[in-house]
Amino acid sequence: MKDVLERYQVWLYLATIILGMMTGWIWPAVADAFDVLLWPALGILLYATFTQVPLTRLATAIRDRQFNAAMVTGNFIIMPAFVWLLLFLAPADPAMRLGIALVLLVPCTDWFISFTHLGGGDSSRAIAATPVLLLLQILTLPVYLWLFLGEEVASANLTAHLVPVFFGLIITPLVLAWLTEKTVEKRPALAGYIHYLGWLPVPALAMVVFLIAASQIALVLETGRMLPHLLLIFSGYLLAAALVGKLLSNAFRLPGARGRTLTFSFGTRNSFVVLPFALALPDLWAPAVVVVVFQSLVELFGMTAYLKWLPRMFRAPD
């Protein structure tokens, strides 16, 4: 049943976005209340998501050096270089450029695993890789934002807005998730708790996108004319991620399931981990929220294509 929910999650999110936009259009007075509800909903989403990452097994995650070398090379060197090139094609609006950089520079740690499983990848390696991906993106994101958007970010004094969110909505759920996993390790009888939390990310994410669509309907309509431009950028990213996955899997001799896992890692991004950053920005930078949410929707449709495409690209036996 959980596999079915994950396989059709893109349609669930699309339906909740449409429902949210209709709600915000018909009852605009709900925007303020939904803005308040959005933050605890995000906190629950991130906590549930982080509990699915084996945070207490970081040492285990780095054992497959060949696979991890390819994963780190692609996610933190090659794909960021491609994002830098994409920014030359991005809209001139600094808020949209920031949104593009925010969402494309962070590898996914949740539905990357789901789509790896659904696409015949190596789920065990995907699970083991997530602590490495999470740790490295926390360290590298500020560096890449400074390199790619240095003057734009500095002039807006964004650090003052992002630091409280980082500690409140990223570090706090992360620490709580780590404590939860440590507790379960000591008391195996509680393992079912994390299993049940594994059902939460999809419905929690549906609630988050509903609240965003309802509370940000005016912003969505205002920036709607730029969505075709963004669609080209995000579609180009997905195509490049698939090609880089194929090239690196050949270079590092990672055929079959490991190659598919690598490519799903390059194609999926941690959109709802960086969403709190976009939401915390001043009103001038609000279009970044639409960029992040729109990218996640494009990515989900892209992943449905990956599910059919990647098994054909990586036919070699493991």
Image (cartoon, rainbow, N blue to C red):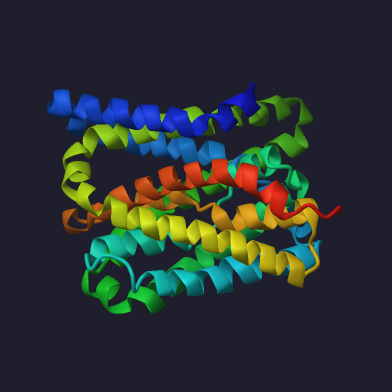
Please name whichever residue, 295 or 54, is drawn nearer the observer in this view of the structure: 295
Please name whichever residue, 231 or 28, is drawn nearer the observer in this view of the structure: 231
The answer to whether residue 117 shows anywhere in this view is yes
Total marks in image: 0
The residue under the point 61% across, 25% down is 4
Left or right of 217: which side holds 107?
A: right
Please name whichever residue, 294 or 302, is drawn nearer the observer in this view of the structure: 302
> Residue 240: image x %, image y %?
54, 64
Left or right of 83: which side holds 111?
A: right
The residue under the point 65% across, 31% down is 194
Up-down: is 79 above or below 132? Answer: below
> Residue 104: image x %, image y %?
45, 60
The answer to whether residue 204 shows anywhere in this view is no
Left or right of 200: which side holds 281?
A: left
Determine the image quadrant of residue 129. bottom right
* Image quadrant where one finds the C terminus: bottom right
Determine the image quadrant of residue 95. bottom left
> Residue 238: image x %, image y %?
51, 56
* Image quadrant where one finds the N terminus: top right
The residue under the point 48% across, 61% down is 237
Up-down: is 191 above or below 169? Answer: above
The residue under the point 14% across, 29% down is 28
